[in-house]
Amino acid sequence: MRNSRGTAASSTDVTFSRLTDESAADEVAALEAASFTNPWSRDALLWELRNSDVTRVYLVRDDDGTLAGFCTCWVIFDEVHINTMAVAAERRRQGVASALLEYVLATARAEGARKATLEVRESNLAAIRLYESMDFKIVARRPRYYTKPEEDALILWRDAGNCRS
């Protein structure tokens, strides 16, 4: 099936929205904690939402309303900085991450972003494959950027105007 943007996202329809209050903060924090060894806390997420005009938190939900994934990012001038993206374990490898990333890039582009950047653990091969398939290029490395376990981050960039949507 196709989602609301015409993108093959999964076997069910998905919807996208932007989190602007604490209505889904518990869901996002729970998915963050389930996905990462050093997760953002609910309080950190809410601080970002309340105190930053550049913060964006995008949600993707299954047709039954279940949170399938989220992406937090900053739109700063002509760049979108993707801070974290997670997809529920049962929804991985079904196109949800691709659809969400395409949505984020298209939305940021509509706000004036022309470039996108992110960091990824060098061992996260699935994420690296996803990002490279969407025209992100590895341009640098941050030694020992991650903890639990300590690991280098790869820094990727792309032109936001190349979004396939």
Image (cartoon, rainbow, N blue to C red):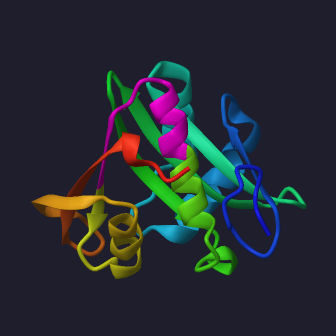
- Relative to 117, say whether 74 is above or below: above
Q: Is residue 47 visible?
A: no
| Residue 18 vs residue 148, the one in the foreground | 18
Residue 86 x/y as whole percent: 53, 62
Q: Quadrant of residue 131?
A: bottom left
Q: Nearer the viewer, residue 71 or 158?
A: 158
Residue at 48% x, 20% y is: 51
Image coordinates of residue 53 in percent, x first then y, are 47, 19
The residue segment tinted magenta is: 104-118
Does 58 sit above or below residue 119? above
Outermost residue, right direction? 64
Let me know if residue 15 appears in the view: yes
Q: Residue at x 67, y 43 (%)?
A: 25
30 horizontally vs 15: left or right = left
Q: Is residue 129 above or below residue 84?
A: below
Relative to 165, is 52 above or below? Answer: above
Q: Nearer the viewer, residue 60 or 106?
A: 106
Question: Image point 46% across, 33% down: which residue?
Answer: 109
Query: Image point 58% across, 55% down: which residue?
Result: 100
- Residue 72 within the segment the image draws in magenta: no
The location of residue 124, given as percent across then percent down, is: 34, 77
- Residue 55 % position (x, y): 47, 30
